[in-house]
Structures are given as structure tokens and as C-alpha cells.
Amino acid sequence: MSKMLRQQLSNRSLLVDLLALMFGLGSWMGVNGIYVQLPLIVHVAPEGWSLPAHMVMLVQFANLGPILYTLYIKYTAWTHDKYIIYSLLAAGVCACIALSFLYDYTSVVFGKEHSTALLSLMFVTSLVGCTSSVLFMPYMRNYREIYLVSYLVGEGLSGFVLSAVALIQGVGSNPRCVNVTKPGSSHLEFEPAESDPRFSSQIFFIFIGILLCLSFLSFLGLNALPVAREERLKLPGSMKILPTDNTIAMPSYKTNSGWKMPKYEYYYSLIMMAVVCLLGHGILPSIQSYSCLPYGNTAYHLTVTLASVAGPLAMSLGFFVKTPQVKLLNILTAAILALSGFVLYLAAKSPYPHLQHSWVGELLVVLVWITVCSLIGFVKMGITTLYRLDPGKGLYYVGAATQIGSLIGAITMFGLVNYAKLFQSYSTCSYLIEN
């Protein structure tokens, strides 16, 4: 293993790896940061436990970004992708800095109080993430293929970094139940008393803004530093590099890599990607609070943080393993479907799931979430690496499949959570009154 690792390291620039990783880090940083803060926000937001479903739906509305980008490059004679990326990253920085001061601002919309500032600014950060699927990742095709894995690890690593900071912040302790029964009343009343974190969400969002600023500078380095420009993929003939500022309709070019994929496998893998993202980006995040919070804040916080770590770790296997075969990805996708079904079952049993108020239940729900997020991360990495040598529009189609699957999952769960009312929230102190 060490010999293979030395060979790989000798054939790449670690600085470019770092720049690509930091570039990927900025793609979903804003959205992941808000999700990591949910254990703090969900108890005070007017939307309550349905806030994650609102957030997932809002992220999917941000698919307006990829749509506008596709129309722009279709009807424009030339485009400069790097300038669009600069603009998106700069917008993400500004949104996160503004979020640090306005995240708790609410207003009445259609007769109901909503977290308007939080959701509006999250929409801006979601535009960055959604557009990255069809813009950032295909942009990495301009560099040698070994740097795509660095980008993918960075894309997932945002969850790991933010989870580590959230653990330091200390937002995961279970609330105390305080007796607020009025004197002379025979009706017992208890209210949860949340423990204060070590630092506020304002500082957390400022930290995210700083990381996004570093991502912006890293992308600038990828385009400006000589060592990064040397790692751009060279083409024979008059073309010195891959078309950076291209259109989707631009004719495919041929490489000498001998890349081939059967037609049925090509489309089947895209469908698999859409299904995995339907679960990982649409369905599961929408019901995470319902499946975890009945087991306590600690279980919920560990699930949010450790599951965010699991995905990037699974993706990082791309540094050491060969591109997975479609048969293996089939097996792993079947496991994802089974585990996702179990998570949905737990959410449907809320507010009184099995093994509630026991350490076995807490451990089970955390392990299931870590496992399913790990498998989703690995399958996404595996499918993406299958297409990274495609001389045509493979990576663009992978990004499109990601967003289509996520959109379908988000719309479905938004209706089930907010209108069908299939999932019920749990009051932390209700068991004291019942007993």
C-alpha cells in the first residue's frame, strides 16, 4: 500500500490537490453549514421539525441556477465558465456573512411566521451548490483526471469540517425538563431547557464565510498559478488544453485513453445516480429530525455530524481503489435502498419509535445513518469516476442526474411532511407527563 501511495504522490502536485480540494469545499459549504446548525435552530425556528423539509425543498428550487446556466451556454456564442464560478463563490461568501447577522430574523408570510432570512440566504448558497453539479465538477475535466477525486473529497469534506466545528461548539446535549406547573394547578407542565453552546451560530456562520473566501482564492490559484496551469490536460494538435469556456453543444473530442461504456450501462448508471441522490439529497434529509430526535438531541447531533464525516471518508477511497464495477455499485445501491427504508420506518413511527429512551435505540439510529451516508458517498464517487474519462458530456449528465433525483425526492417529501402529515414531532418532556 505504501509503495502504491508513493507512486501516486510522485505523479501529482500536492499543491494542486489542495487547491482542487479547497475549490470543492466551497460547493456545498453554505448548505452543509446550515444543516449542521439544525440541532440548535430547529427548536427555536417557527417551522419546528418541518424546517428540514422546507430547507430541502428550497435547495431544489435553486436548480434554477443549472437551468439558467444551461440556457445561457446554449444560446450564447461563447461563455467564460471561470467568471461564472467566481461570481457564484463570491455570492456564497456574502450570503454566509449576512447569514451570521440575520439567521434568526423571522417575518409573517401568508399568515404564518417563517424564518425568511435563513431560508432566503440559504437559497443563495444553494444556487452555488446546485450549479456546482453542472459547472464546478465538469470544469475539473480541464485538469488531469487524478485531481477530480481531490475535488470530490473536498466537496464532501465540507460536512466533515463543519461537523468537527459543531462538536467543539457543543450543540448536542439533551435538554433538561423544567417543571413550570402553575401554583395550585393539578395539570403538570414541563418545558425543555436547552443548554447553551460554547459559541453562537453567528460565529459559526462567519467561520463558514471565511472558508468560502478560501475556496474562492483556491479557484483563483487553479487558474493563475503556473504549477496549476501545468497540470491542465494537454491535447494533441493545435489545442493546448481542454476547452475551459465551452458550450455543452461543443463537439466531443477524442482522447487516447480508450474510454468506452456500453450504451445501456451509460444510461443505467445515470439512473442509479439519480436514485441515490433522490434518497441522499431529497428524502433522507427531509425526515432526519423525525427519525433521530425521538431518541434525543445527542442522537440527532451525532447523526448529523458523524454522517457528514462518513460521506467524505467513503469518497476518499477513490484515492486508493480502482474504479468500482457496476455490479458492485448495484449491490451497494440495494443496501442503500434497504437502509433508507428502515430510516423511513423509524420516521413514520415518530414520536414513539421502537427502543426509545434506551442506549440501544440511540446507537442503532446513529449507526444506520452513518452506514447509509457512507454507502451513498461511495456510490456517488464510483459513478462519477466511471464518467470522468468521458471525452463528451458525461460529467455534465452526472450532475444533471444528481439534481433531477434530488428534486424529485425533495418535492415528494415536502408534500408528505407538510400536507400529508405522515410524520409527527415528539415533545422532549411528554413522557414525564404521561408517567
Image: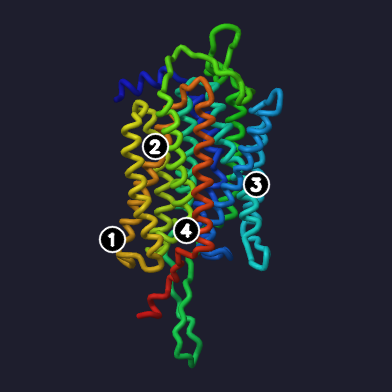
Q: CA distance from mark 3 to mark 4?
A: 23 Å
Give the number of the mark in front: 2 or 4.
2
Q: Which residue is mark 2?
A: 379
Residue 360, which numbered label?
A: 1
Residue 178 percent across, percent down from the top left: 45, 77
For mark 4, does the 10 Å Cα neighbourhood hold few (<14), some (14 to 19), or many (20 or more) residues?
many
Q: Quadrant of the C terminus?
A: bottom left
Q: Quadrant of the N terminus?
A: top left
Residue 427 percent across, percent down from the top left: 45, 71
> At numbered mark 2, what does the secondary structure look like: helix, strand or loop?
helix
Give the number of the mark in front: 3 or 4.
3
Q: Amino acid at mark 1?
A: Val
Give the number of the mark in front: 1 or 4.
1
**Name of the residue lying farthest toward the top:** 237
Q: Which residue is mark 3?
A: 95
Q: Amino acid at mark 3?
A: Ala
Residue 375, which numbered label?
A: none
